């Protein structure tokens, strides 16, 4: 096992060793959302024709968990290593900036998918669900997790303290995921907020992911794919540039 | 054959709270392959900055640094493969056991199937029974040993130890030095920074001293010792020293040490002590040690020779 694969393995092992906290806890959170919102809103909200609210909610919760946990993995690993000082063990190695990127983002994708799968396995029993166009679900889960893993890398490089990281998470990641249509179809929003939602790349990730289940979506999956791929490329480009320049890593 | 480590006109400036700080000012010297080299200086002299630049943890504002001919910026991968750094801070990754930590560190350098060498390191550093223990469970001294093992896990030809014995007990110091001395005998180059000058005197063939970011002395340890005050008066006393003696004395609790250039000066110091009514016990007169040389140089009393040419001479 060599180079970046070692770092990838270490990053996966890191969250797996504390999987009660990194996998079980977010699965429980998603189930609570499903129980509360699903129970309260099942008979109140209609989304697509013949799709019950709970069925609609499940893919949204799965994707939200994928995104939040992909972000949490790279960001928390980096900030912890920076604050405890053990990042030095990595800084003295010959690993290139591409190796860092591949390992941190790769492990984030793994964590995102593991948690997403966990949420799916637990929630799928609550409502009828089928996978109409599964490849869309796979593509958006991978791209979304990759983008959030890269965003977590940027946040982890930028933040110097845990409260800066918490601010990044609470003021950027949380609002963007919650306002991306996890709990509702954007068609149920007033026109202004519909337009605002279309500026949020997270909306396209969740809408595209849902397409995989219901075979219908708020916007074309191809448009979603273009937006998500472009966002991923942009975020990945920034992350790679910061790593290469040694931003906040090498004084 | 290229130098094991080469610093060439290295400068480092950064913006501090009170404007621009010059941490390193035109530092140049080479460490030849196989040397046991000491880098000394008071806190803030720039030792750790220099080592950070060598390790790629920081970047020089100007100048070049290379390891076995590999530039630490342009050819960083080869330079870092040749280098094993024991950091000053006692850092560790709390998620892993000692063996996992070493396997992972080995993998970063592209070395797999390294368990035989890992076992040898664990044995040599007295860690064999801790291989399965989580890093969090280890005492400070044990964590320090793991740091040394981590630095050596990819068998680097050049080993850098940044204050490895700060706050370390006697037993570990002995283990560490016999281990490092063995590696040096096997051909590894060792660069050591330390506050314990007796360690540097005992181990290092050559020494550079840094003061305020500049090299103020660079020579064989024996030459540094020979080129300074020859006599050292040591005694115990409960009385305050007269000011003219105190100005040149090193006082540790009851023990005072005063340097003297020759027998005449020894007599004059004793006369002044007697005149001031200082009662002296356990008086010894011995040779000056590296600590005296260090203090003399740091207080600016010693004009070191121009570094680079003399080093070259000393090596031949």
Image (cartoon, rainbow, N blue to C red):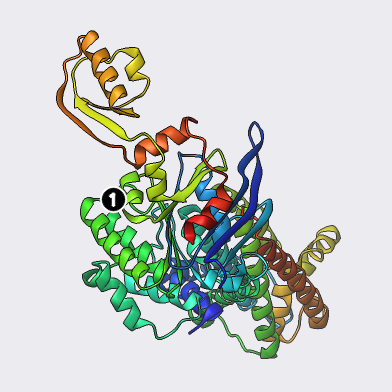
> At x 71% / y 70%, what residue is drawn?
A236
In the image, taking residue B18 as reference, residue B35 lies left or right, namely: left
Residue identifier under label 1: B168
Name the foreground residue: A155 vs A243.
A243
Q: Residue furthest left?
A: B282
Which structural element holds mark 1? loop
> At x 33% / y 19%, what residue is drawn?
B246
In this view of the protein, can residue A61 be seen by the observer?
no
In this view of the protein, can residue A6 be seen by the observer?
yes
Residue B94 horizontal/vertical position (percent): 38, 62
Residue A45 horizontal/vertical position (percent): 68, 69
Name the foreground residue: A115 vs B249.
B249
> At x 30% / y 23%, what residue is drawn?
B264
- Label 1 chain ID: B
| In this view, B213 is above or below A145 | above
> At x 54% / y 57%, what residue is drawn?
B312
Residue A172 horizontal/vertical position (percent): 67, 56
In the image, taking residue B207 as reference, residue B233 lies left or right, namely: left
| In this view, A155 is above or below B126 | above
| In this view, B175 is above or below B239 | below
């Amino acid at each position: 096992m060599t180079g970046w694969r070692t770092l990838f393995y270490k990053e996966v092992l890191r969250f797996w060793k504390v999987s009660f906290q990194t996998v079980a806890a977010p699965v429980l959170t998603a189930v609570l959302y499903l129980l509360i919102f699903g129970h309260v809103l099942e008979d109140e909200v209609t989304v697509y024709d013949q799709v019950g609210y709970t069925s609609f909610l499940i893919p949204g919760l799965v994707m939200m968990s994928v995104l939040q946990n992909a972000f949490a993995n790279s960001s928390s690993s980096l900030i912890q290593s920076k604050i405890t000082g053990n990042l030095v063990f990595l800084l003295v190695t010959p690993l290139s900036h591409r190796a860092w990127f591949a390992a941190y983002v790769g492990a984030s994708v793994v964590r995102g998918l593991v948690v997403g799968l966990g949420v799916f396995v637990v929630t799928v029993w609550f409502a009828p669900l089928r996978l109409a166009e599964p490849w869309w679900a796979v593509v958006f889960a991978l791209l979304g997790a990759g983008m959030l893993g890269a965003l977590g890398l940027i946040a982890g490089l930028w933040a110097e303290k845990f409260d800066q990281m918490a601010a990044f998470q609470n003021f950027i990641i949380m609002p963007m995921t919650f306002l991306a249509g996890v709990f509702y179809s954007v068609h149920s929003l007033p026109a202004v907020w519909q337009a605002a939602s279309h500026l949020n790349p997270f909306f396209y990730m969740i809408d595209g992911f849902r397409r995989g289940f219901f075979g219908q979506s708020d916007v074309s999956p191809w448009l979603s794919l273009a937006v998500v791929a472009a966002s991923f490329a942009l975020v990945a480009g920034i992350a790679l540039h910061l790593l290469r320049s040694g931003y906040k890593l090498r004084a | 054959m290229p130098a094991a480590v080469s610093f060439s006109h290295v400068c480092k400036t950064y913006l501090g709270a009170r404007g621009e700080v010059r941490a390193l000012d035109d530092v140049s010297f080479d460490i030849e392959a196989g040397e046991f080299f000491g880098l000394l200086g008071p806190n803030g002299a720039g030792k750790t900055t220099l080592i950070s630049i060598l390790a790629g943890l920081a970047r020089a504002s100007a100048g070049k640094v290379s390891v076995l001919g590999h530039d630490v910026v342009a050819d960083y991968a080869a330079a870092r493969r040749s280098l094993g750094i024991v950091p000053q801070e006692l850092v560790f990754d709390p998620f892993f056991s000692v063996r996992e930590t070493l396997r992972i560190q080995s993998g970063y350098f592209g070395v797999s199937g390294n368990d035989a060498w890992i076992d040898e390191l664990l044995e040599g550093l007295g860690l064999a029974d801790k291989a399965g223990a989580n890093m969090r469970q280890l005492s400070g001294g044990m964590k320090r040993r793991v740091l040394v093992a981590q630095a050596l896990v990819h068998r680097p030809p050049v080993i850098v130890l940044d204050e490895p014995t700060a706050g370390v007990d006697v037993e570990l110091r002995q283990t560490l030095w016999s281990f490092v001395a063995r590696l040096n005998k096997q051909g590894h180059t060792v660069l050591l920074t330390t506050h314990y000058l007796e360690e540097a005197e005992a181990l290092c063939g050559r020494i550079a001293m840094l003061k305020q970011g500049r090299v103020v002395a660079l020579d064989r340890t024996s030459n540094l010792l020979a080129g300074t005050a020859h006599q050292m008066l040591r005694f115990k006393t409960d009385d305050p020293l007269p000011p003219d003696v105190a100005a040149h004395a090193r006082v540790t609790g009851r023990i005072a040490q005063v340097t003297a250039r020759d027998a005449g000066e020894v007599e004059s110091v004793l006369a002044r002590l007697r005149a001031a009514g200082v009662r002296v016990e356990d008086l010894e007169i011995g040779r000056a040690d590296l600590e005296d040389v260090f203090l003399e140089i740091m207080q600016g009393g010693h004009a070191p020779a121009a570094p680079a040419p003399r080093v070259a001479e000393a090596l031949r």
